[in-house]
Image (cartoon, rainbow, N blue to C red):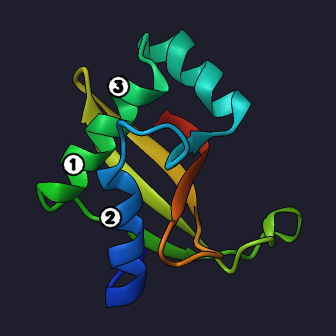
Amino acid sequence: MPPLTDPELLARYKSALRNWNVTGYLTWKEVAELWLRDNLGLTPRMMARSMHDHVEAGGEIQQVRERRPDWDDYEFHYDLRLPVSGRLIYIETVLKDEDPTDPIVHVVSIHYA
């Protein structure tokens, strides 16, 4: 999958992640939040910080054109793969940037990679 290279989109995504400790900038679909708690014993805020740290350290964000008919509210989704407790975790997100000055990253899926 190709990395996210568009400078404006990348800046918006990173802006939302930089606010990992502020409610509302990194949100979770309920099923993803439940998986996180049940399988990793982590809170959304704990994982948000890991996502932020991973990206700031140079971890790749993959931009994937959305082709699934039931998920086409957004043109793209953005994937992260990062190690957590010795396991590689796959996180699928969407970037809600209707207001480009106040973007939100929404986690829609998470599981072991």
Q: Residue 46 carries which label?
A: 3
Q: Distance between the residues labelled 2 and 1?
A: 11 Å
Mark 1 nearby-residue class (10 Å; few <14, some 14–19, many ≥20): some
Residue drawn at the location 43% of the way across and 10% of the way down: 41
Are the two marked residues, 3 and 1, in contact with CB atoms closer than 8 angstroms?
A: no
Q: Where is residue 92 drawn, in percent x and y?
A: 54, 52
The amino acid on which the numbered mark 3 sits, given as a three-letter code, is: Met
Q: Where is residue 31 drawn, in percent x and y?
A: 71, 29
Q: Residue 54 carries which label?
A: 1
Q: Which of marks 2 and 1 is in front?
A: 2
Q: Is residue 54 left or right of residue 94?
A: left
* Label 2 element class: helix
Are the two marked residues, 2 and 1, in contact with CB atoms closer than 8 angstroms?
A: no
Mark 3 nearby-residue class (10 Å; few <14, some 14–19, many ≥20): few
Q: Is tag 3's residue or tag 2's residue first in the polypeptide sequence?
A: 2
* Label 3 element class: helix
Looking at the rendered image, the quarter that the C terminus falls into is top left
Q: Which of marks 3 and 1 is in front?
A: 3
Q: Which residue in the protein does label 2 denote? A: 14
